[in-house]
Amino acid sequence: MTEMLAKKREEEDCKLCPKFTQTFMMLGKKWNGLIIEVLLERPTLRFKDIAGAITKCSDRVLCERLKELEDEQIVVRNTYPGSSRVDYSLTERGRELAPVMEAVHKWSDKWC
């Protein structure tokens, strides 16, 4: 019986925090990190400007990723009354990823 409890405890210790897992699922999704990085560099951009900065991402996928980041409250889609203008910017939650992105830059400069 003690062995079973020890094994169960060991399995529980190896589980990742659901919030950590959710964060990495969002950040690790192809193009999301680059979208966040582009919007950290230039706080408000139109779709075409984001697409121009991330040239290998198709418009369809970029549109999907922006929508997903909106759903995660990382990006906000800004519309303007009386105009067809639409642009994107980071929310406060998105801007708070700046130190994370900076750490990734430092790591990649050292190891890549």
Image (spheres, grey):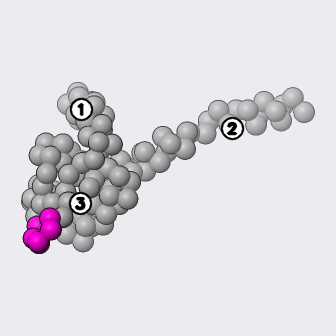
Labels 1, 3: front one: 3
Amino acid, disc 2: Glu
Q: Is residue 111 visible?
A: no
- Where residue 102 appears, x then y in whole percent? 24, 32
Element on which disc 3 rests: strand
Q: Nearer the viewer, mark 2 or mark 1?
A: 1
Quadrant location of residue 68? bottom left
Instruction: Give the residue type that dot 3 points to.
Output: Arg
Q: Secondary structure at mark 2?
A: helix
**Which residue in the structure is indicated by mark 3?**
77
> Image quadrant of residue 72?
bottom left
10 to the left or right of 80:
right
Q: Quadrant of residue 9?
A: top right
Q: Which residue is mark 2?
A: 11
Camera-side residue of 51 and 5: 51
Query: Which label lies toward us, 2 or 3?
Result: 3
Question: Magenta segment range?
Answer: 80-86
Amino acid marked by disc 1: Glu
How many residues crowd mark 3 within 10 Å: few (<14), some (14–19), many (20+)? some
Query: Does residue 29 belong to the magenta stretch?
Result: no
Tell which circle, 2 or 3, labels the residue nearer the N-terminal end.
2
The quadrant the C terminus occupies is top left
Residue linked to disc 1:
102
